[in-house]
Image (spheres, rainbow, N blue to C red):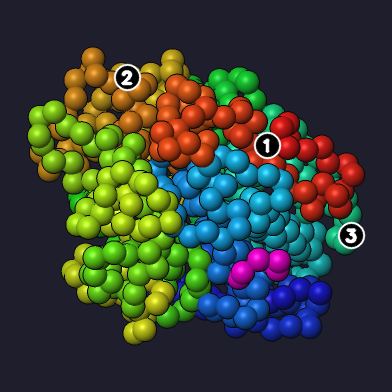
Amino acid sequence: MLVLASALLASCSKDLDIQPKYDVTAEQVYSNPANYKNVLAKLYSGLALSGQQGPAGQPDITGIDEGFSTYLRQYWQLQELTTDEAVIGWNDAGLPDLHNLSWTSSNQFVTAMYNRLYYQIGICNEFIRQTTDAKLASRNITGSDLDNAKKYRAEARFLRALSYYHALDMYGNVPFVTEEDEVGAIQPEQIMRPELFAYVESELLAISGDNGELVNAKQNEYGRADKAAAWALLAKLYLNAQVYTGQAKYTEAITYCNKVIEAAYSLSPQYLNLFLADNNTSPEMIFTVNFDGVNSRTYGGMTFLVHGEVGGKMDPAAFGIDGGWGGQRTTKALVSQFSDPSGSTDKRALFFTDGQSLEINDISLFTDGYAITKYRNITSAGKPGSDPTKLTPDTDYPMLRLGDVYLMYAEAVLRGGAGGSAATALQYVNALRQRAYGDATGNITAASLTLDFILAERARELYWEGTRRTDLIRFGRFTTAAYLWPYKGGARNGRAVSDDYNLFPIPSTDIIANPKLKQNPGY
């Protein structure tokens, strides 16, 4: 049986409204080509929403509060709360363990992310399984319907590759299932990290190459994957190849950064506009997770990111919301990244300090730690988002954007990759800094462009965008004493922890259910 998400994925309206129908067979759904885009919408909405009814009531996965269960909320928490960039004041079971780098295989948030990954992989597998050439021919899908079905299938392969990339990065050696596996109660085999890397690479290359069926760069509807999205994800995959496989692939990272850059994306003139309610108009976005205040209602996703950052003396109306949740702040380690001896102002330093202390004495107090004002449900014209209740934002999440690609290019060049140049790397970094400072005040010289500078610049440019944990691991700073921040390892001033924490554990529930799986070291 298949749940059909009867929704259209619109472009500028960012409509992910889902009206589910139940008790229909796959054959009934896929016999009508008009349904294919509806099901594709469910695959995309799996990154944003929690179930079939917003904001709660019919969850995709159970065993956790539905608002906690969304893909983006858990992805952000595991990538940010484990680092110097974010703390959260709530004491839900397992949440402080993320700050403290002391989670176990029974942590509810580690489990929720894992379950969401495999839910997403599962629904993508089903769509891919139902859209083979043989299946389409047997249903007499022809002409433009056939062309569209093949494009949609390529998008489903991208979304599956994205989730497997996240599984590769977070969990390492994981269960592996594709459309070739029999549907039903099976115990998947475990794939090793280098082999999963190769699989994700092969999928992205297949769908984005000259004969790949993803649409060309910038030719798809906003929020849907095209070849540039696959190239940007390939660049990210290759940049981290040394961690994932033990083999460096910086030349390949440069190659795919170049392909994205040559696709004529451009930086948003204003940094803040990347994170506002009309950020769908940005020329910088390569792949986003879309939200719509009226049609995609959730307590996770951007609802969580916008509401959770507001508290203390902050005015919720200035963020286009009905009230703050008093959750996320940052540590002084991130604040210190913006220290500039020249006294010039980096406009990316979006901190709220009134009534907030720089030092965190008590994580549970919202006023301990500077607040962040990065995500807002306000347009660039100063208007609130479309939801009249001001609960759910219109703001989209920038999963892949040009600023990240510029910094990946520069890092890959510094690490010895071929096919790029130090001069071009400096040009890209200074383009970001010129936007940040409003003029050439923040420009650096070639001598200043070092790997340490790149790590710091990635913090300044990309904080709270879900890159920090992966970056710190790549630079050898996540678990070691080489870099400490407040409450790392549960210590007020930070301490080193076991390198085992470079990976999250496979949840104990899955280890018990599937004897084919071997737990990650240390758990």
- Count of numbered circles on the image: 3
Q: Where is residue 359 in the image (x, y as percent from the top left)?
A: 31, 44
Tell me the quadrant of the picture where the N terminus can be found. bottom right
* Residue designated by label 2: 450
Q: Residue 277 carries which label?
A: none
- Compared with residue 95, is residue 517 higher up or lower down, i.e. above or below? above
Residue 123 visible from this viewpoint:
yes
Q: Is residue 115 left or right of residue 89?
A: right
Q: SS of the residue at dot 2?
A: loop
Q: Residue at x 70, y 68 (%)?
A: 62
Q: Which label's residue is closer to the chain start, 2 or 1? A: 1
Secondary structure type for disc 1:
loop
Q: Which kind of residue does numbered mark 1 sit on?
A: Gly
Query: In the image, what residue occupies the spot 35% across and 22% down?
Result: 452
- Packing grade of label 3 (10 A; few <14, some 14-19, many >=20) is few
Which of 107/70 is in front? 107
Cα–Cα span, label 3 and label 1: 23 Å
Q: Where is residue 436 in the image (x, y as percent from the top left)?
A: 19, 42
